Image (cartoon, rainbow, N blue to C red):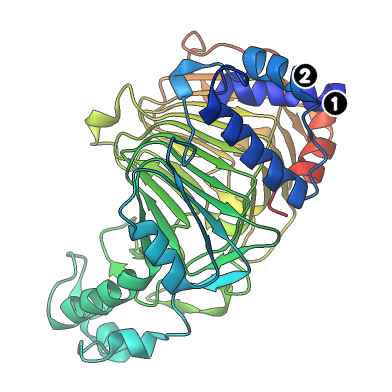
Amino acid sequence: MKKTNVIFLASLAVLSGMMVSSVSANAKVHHQEHAIKRVIKRSKRRTKFHRKNNRKQVSQTLFNQPSFKTTGGNQKGSKKFTVTSAVQLRKAIKANVQSRTVYIKGTIDMQDGKTADDYAQNTGYDFQQYLDEYNPDTYGRQEVSGVQEKARHKAQEQQAKDVEIHVPANTSIIGLKNAHLKNANLMVENNNVIIKNLNFQSPVDDFPQWDPTDGSTGNWNSQYDCISVKGASNVWIDHNTFNDQPYSDANEGTYFGRDYQHHDGMTDITDGANNVTLSNNVYQNHDKTILIGSSDSKHSDANQLHVNIIGNEFKNTVQRTPRVRYGTVNVINNYYDNQSKGAYQFSYAWGIGKNSKVNIQNNVLNVDAKPNHLISKLGGKSFRASGNVLNGKAIKNLNQIAKLPSNHMKSIKNILPTNQVKAHVVKNAGNR
């Protein structure tokens, strides 16, 4: 194994705590390693384990972190499914088993060709009537209610029946070579889940809601993420690609002076979720990318939301990479690339929100911004930054820009040096 990959695996393992305690003594772990190796082989991964003795050594020294034990569907008696359609995927997810691994083959569209007209049928929803009823010039700035809002909500509920997939505990969802998942929102509300090697086309909310109270002028808000982690612990999201294309909000115009936005987040982690790792993914062509903590008033999130974000590529993402409330978050060895002047023009990288503790370490940014535009200061508790590079130059003043104490966060050891991050991430991130 190349030295670079050993270092990177070590850092990922220390952060995510993937549970591999002994290959020879634990059959469950052996099956997990074999399954991951099989997916890596199919995807033509550059990073490979050596022979059995070396695998044993790597597993014992790098992956034995009990706080983040994530095995997914690799349980005794686990059921395996290979699915090629939305119907098969729903059936596999709903199967009455204690543990499952679902392999996705080819392209699955959870809407199976249904359109907004199909979902709005018999609800009474009419977009033009909705615009007329809630025009700010006549309706004002109170929360929307009434006939058309009720109809919009009914239509959205009909769409959600197809789009939302509620993932059970002890589940792995793994894409085979070049697997695509369209118009799907994986709802991870149960513990011990792995989602790996999928190409997500962001779900499109056909029925955005107008909220006059959102911001100074109101906003259009949408319902669906690609992955929503709500209240779950021990979740590993690895080697996926997330993309709005071919459906861009830039093509939808504006109403009431605000973009008519059909997308929400790509990976949102909320409601006391804990021990979540996002590794080796590609996030591209999106606005609100990763949200950790949903509200300043969600005090129950305190001491939860431990999240590690490592080895990801953020390409033409506008903001929230991530945006954090309450969480304790490491953002390490990621590559950011955004020179867009259009719908995906860079806004900020890191949102340091209420009572958050964030460590930003050895990241590389190629974005049209100055250091003081990389951070959105929203009430953090602790912030630490080191080893980061912006447009080829070391960033030396992020801690001063944040103006927060750094004593709550520690530097992570055995991670990639900054000068190796870009090449490694571009080569290894995303699905295959």
- The residue nearer to you, when weighing 16 against 215, is 16
Residue, x 44% and y 77% (percent of image)? 111
Q: Nearer the viewer, mark 2 or mark 1?
A: 2
Is 35 rendered above or below residue 244? above
- Residue 8, relative to residue 409: is it above or below? below
The number of numbered badges drawn on the structure is: 2
Does 387 sit left or right of 255 as displayed?
Answer: right
Residue 258 can be seen, yes or no: no
Report x, y in % for residue 160. 32, 69
Name which of mark 2 and mark 1 comes first in the sequence.
1
Q: Which residue is mark 1?
A: 1
Point out residue 311 in the picture as x, y percentages from the top left corner: 68, 35
Looking at this view, is 244 or 90 the one in front? 90
Label 2, label 1: how far apart the Cα atoms are: 10 Å
Residue bearing mark 2: 54
Image quadrant of residue 64?
top right
Residue 143 figure quarter:
bottom left
**Residue 125 position in % (x across, y down):** 24, 87
Whether label 2 touches label 1, CB < 8 Å: yes
As shown in the figure, which amino acid type bears the numbered disc 2? Asn
Tell me the element at label 2. Answer: helix
Residue extending farthest to the top is: 407
Q: Residue furthest right?
A: 2
- Height in image: 286 above or below 406? below
User: In screen coordinates, is 387 left or right of 182?
Assistant: right
Pick the quarter of the image with the C terminus. bottom right
Q: Looking at the figure, which quarter contains the N terminus?
A: top right
